[in-house]
Image (cartoon, rainbow, N blue to C red):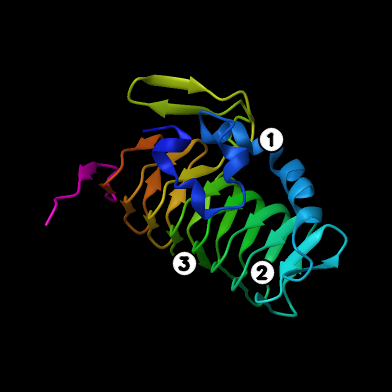
Amino acid sequence: MLTIQDLFDLDHTLAGDYLRQFTYPWEALKGIKELILSLGPALDPAEYSEISPQVWVHKSANVFPTAYLGAPCIIGPNTEVRHGAFIRGSALVGADCVVGNSVELKNVILFDHVQTPHYNYVGDSILGYYSHMGAGSITSNVKADKQLVKVHSPEGDLETGIKKFGAMLGDHVEVGCNAVLNPGTVIGRNSNVYPTTCVRGVVPADSIVKNDGSIIQKVSS
């Protein structure tokens, strides 16, 4: 439930070939900047404009004039980057995404159809196809003790060897408003997180995380 193949449909991101090199998604975090720098110059100039050095925006995207796009980044087709959005850099944002007001992105891959629409911080994270973060929900990407992040899985802790690691959201994950995803959180496909919940460790696919931290499996209709 922790591998890239478990979590993501790689046909819905420009990073598909890159991600196929790895077993676990957090292994890809260190190379996001270099990935964007390799993809950007190869983008079709009939479709993408390099609006500033190392910032490529699809011509169908809607970027509000008050948004900040830091290099390097790629903004995909039909994506909307709204008022006051702050893309610090190393952000690969797919097609049909929403980067909302006062949202901050840093060292991330957003698959197609991802929504981070209101007051979200997403850092050192990968958000899968059609995943959605409710208003005010954030990824916490550094431990309070500044130690290397571990993934707390049912089979035991997995060492990642990295200090900054927010969350991995599988395809079709729904995160409720004002939820906090602690460093090293991995949420399986089609799972839901209740609003205001503090999440740590691994959430299996097709699950619901409740406010008390309990995890239940969804019931098929």
Q: In terms of depth relative to the viewer, which is nearer, 182 or 155?
A: 155
Q: Quadrant of the N terminus?
A: top left
Amino acid on which disc 2 is placed: Ala
Of tags 1 and 2, the one toward the viewer is: 1
| Residue 26 rendering spot, x and y as whole percentages | 56, 34
Question: What residue is shown with label 1?
Answer: 30
Residue 41 within the segment the image draws in magenta: no
Q: Is residue 143 left or right of residue 200?
A: right
Residue 72's place in the image compared with 97, above or below, is above
Q: Residue at x 55, y 42 (%)?
A: 166
User: SS for tag 2?
Assistant: loop
Of tags 1 and 3, the one toward the viewer is: 1
Q: Residue at x 54, y 67 (%)?
A: 97
Q: In terms of depth relative to the viewer, which is nearer, 192 or 22?
A: 22
Q: Can you tell which quarter of the image residue 58 is in?
A: bottom right
**Residue 72 in view, yes or no:** no
Which numbered disc flags the more N-terminal residue, 1 or 3? Answer: 1
Mark 3–mark 2 Cα distance, whole angstroms, equals 14 Å
Mark 1–mark 2 Cα distance, whole angstroms, equals 23 Å
User: SS for tag 3?
Assistant: loop
Identify the main secondary structure in magenta: loop
**How many other residues sit within 10 Å of disc 3, few (<14), some (14-19) or many (≥20)?**
some
**Residue 87 in view, yes or no:** yes
Q: What segment carries the magenta color?
A: 209-221
| Residue 27 rendering spot, x and y as whole percentages | 59, 31
Q: In terms of depth relative to the viewer, which is nearer, 102 or 170?
A: 170
Which numbered disc flags the more N-terminal residue, 3 or 2? Answer: 2
Question: What residue is shown with label 2?
Answer: 85
Amino acid on which disc 1 is placed: Lys
Question: What residue is shown with label 3?
Answer: 135
Residue 39's place in the image compared with 2, above or below, is below
Mark 1–mark 3 Cα distance, whole angstroms, equals 27 Å
